[in-house]
């Protein structure tokens, strides 16, 4: 194919965990198929300082031009307006320097510029919506609609959401559930491609786990060989039901006295007055360390608040845990969980967060652990990075 120049816009930084797992691997894969990429991302200063050289080498090796801009958080709202203005200036410079044919916008903030670029220059606009972001902000308690400013912002983005969906050349949704919801609106949306969050099976490969490194990590975390390690991986709070997961651990501890709860997150964790707080370990891992941390897990949890916006949720952690044969207890009524994992060995979906359901799940842990080792995993084939890159390539070609 002739080389197409793609401008990729992300309000998440490449130095952020999401950028490391859900932006850079896809772009690297697509660059190898013949696309010329320029990535503009917004980076947090402290994190960028640590990751800059590593990311720069990856981009240079794959002939990807990377333009990191500084992310601003304060003051609220005005800082985002400022970032959007800086992004527009950078996009304009990029177009006049070397015109791009496709502008790929990750989520709603960058889509403001993508739509503007399409209207001004006629470039192809991909709205990679990632989820129902506007409703996520409200349901997650980040935007209180009783505040008139947030009410105005919410109304503005609900109007823009429909414009993005109508005027995009391609729309990317994380779930079939979200696609069906959009189609029910009857707004004459652009073609919608479903591409879930994917996992790099070369990185998350159980055969690459070094047993000596595993032993050193276990010692560092004060874990014993016989401990039953319940893991939670990723963001802590907002849509993730932390109290329910702590309640689950309380019951697990009663049934398995050697149970420990390993929480791997970059967020602050407050376990309050949990009776077993001395057995709760909170730590952080950079992306390349995550497989090793997962390898210590006996089982894992992923409880997400069922809500309208979560129809579009596709948790990155599920594919990563599956790849390393860790049994998962998750909940129904989130994204495509019900269809994708209903009959998947090693994954148990619970319908309610009750003591009865927790007891039943814990009683099945040994069965789940054996089932998690079964191959092939049907869902994992769909969640592989290779499949994700193929689907994005099809969207670009379309």
Image (cartoon, grey):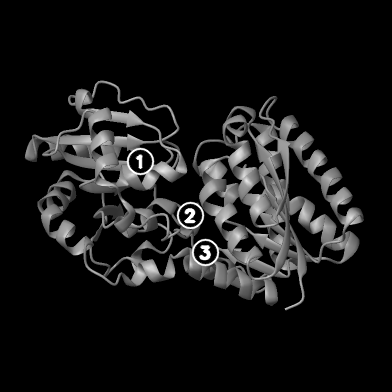
Mark 2, residue position: 308
Callout in the foreground (1, 2)? 1
In this rendering, the count of numbered labels is: 3
Other residues around mark 2 within 10 Å, as few (<14) / some (14–19) / many (≥20): some
Mark 1, residue position: 241
| One can see residue 184 in this view | no
The CA distance from mark 3 to mark 1 is 21 Å
The CA distance from mark 3 to mark 2 is 9 Å
The answer to whether residue 177 is above or below residue 60 is below
Q: Name the residue located 56 percent from the left edge and 42 percent from the top edge.
A: 137
Cβ atoms under marks 3 and 2 closer than 8 Å: no
Callout in the foreground (3, 2)? 3
The CA distance from mark 1 to mark 2 is 16 Å
**Residue 188 position in % (x across, y down):** 69, 73
Label 3 element class? helix
The answer to whether residue 390 is above or below residue 318 is below
């Amino acid at each position: 194919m002739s080389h197409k120049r793609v401008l990729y816009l992300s309000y998440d930084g490449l130095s952020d965990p999401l950028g490391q797992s859900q932006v850079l691997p896809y772009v690297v894969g697509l660059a190898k198929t013949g696309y010329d990429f320029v990535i503009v991302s917004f980076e947090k200063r402290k994190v960028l300082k640590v990751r800059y050289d590593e990311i720069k080498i990856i981009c240079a090796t794959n002939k990807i031009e990377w333009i990191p801009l500084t992310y601003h958080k304060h003051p609220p709202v005005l800082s985002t307006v400022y970032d959007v203005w800086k992004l527009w200036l950078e996009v304009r410079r990029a177009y006049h320097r070397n015109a791009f044919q496709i502008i790929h916008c990750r989520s709603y903030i960058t889509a403001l510029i993508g739509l503007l670029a399409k209207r001004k220059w006629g470039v192809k606009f991909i709205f990679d919506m990632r989820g129902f972001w506007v409703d996520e902000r409200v349901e997650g308690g980040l935007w209180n609609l009783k505040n008139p400013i947030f009410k105005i912002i919410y109304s503005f983005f609900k109007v823009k959401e429909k414009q993005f969906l109508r005027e995009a050349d391609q729309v990317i949704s994380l779930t079939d559930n979200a696609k069906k919801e959009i189609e029910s609106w009857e707004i004459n949306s652009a073609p919608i491609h479903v591409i879930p969050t994917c996992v790099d099976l070369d990185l998350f490969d159980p055969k690459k786990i070094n047993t000596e490194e595993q032993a050193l990590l276990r010692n560092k975390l004060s874990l014993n060989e016989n401990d039953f390690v319940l893991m939670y991986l990723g963001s802590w709070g907002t849509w993730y039901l932390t109290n329910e997961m702590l309640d689950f651990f309380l019951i697990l501890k009663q049934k398995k006295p050697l149970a420990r709860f390993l929480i791997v997150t970059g967020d602050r964790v407050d376990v309050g007055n949990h009776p077993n707080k001395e057995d709760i370990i909170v730590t952080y891992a950079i992306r390349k360390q995550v497989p090793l941390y997962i390898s210590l897990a006996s089982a894992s949890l992923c409880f997400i608040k069922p809500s309208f916006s979560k129809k579009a949720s596709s948790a990155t952690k599920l594919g990563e845990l599956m790849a390393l044969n860790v049994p998962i207890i998750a909940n129904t009524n989130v994204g495509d969980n019900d269809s994708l994992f209903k009959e998947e060995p090693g994954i148990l979906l619970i319908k309610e967060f009750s003591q009865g359901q927790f007891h039943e799940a814990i009683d099945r842990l040994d069965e789940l652990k054996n089932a998690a080792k079964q191959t092939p995993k049907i869902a994992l084939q769909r969640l592989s990075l290779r499949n994700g890159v193929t689907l994005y390539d099809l969207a670009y070609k379309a």
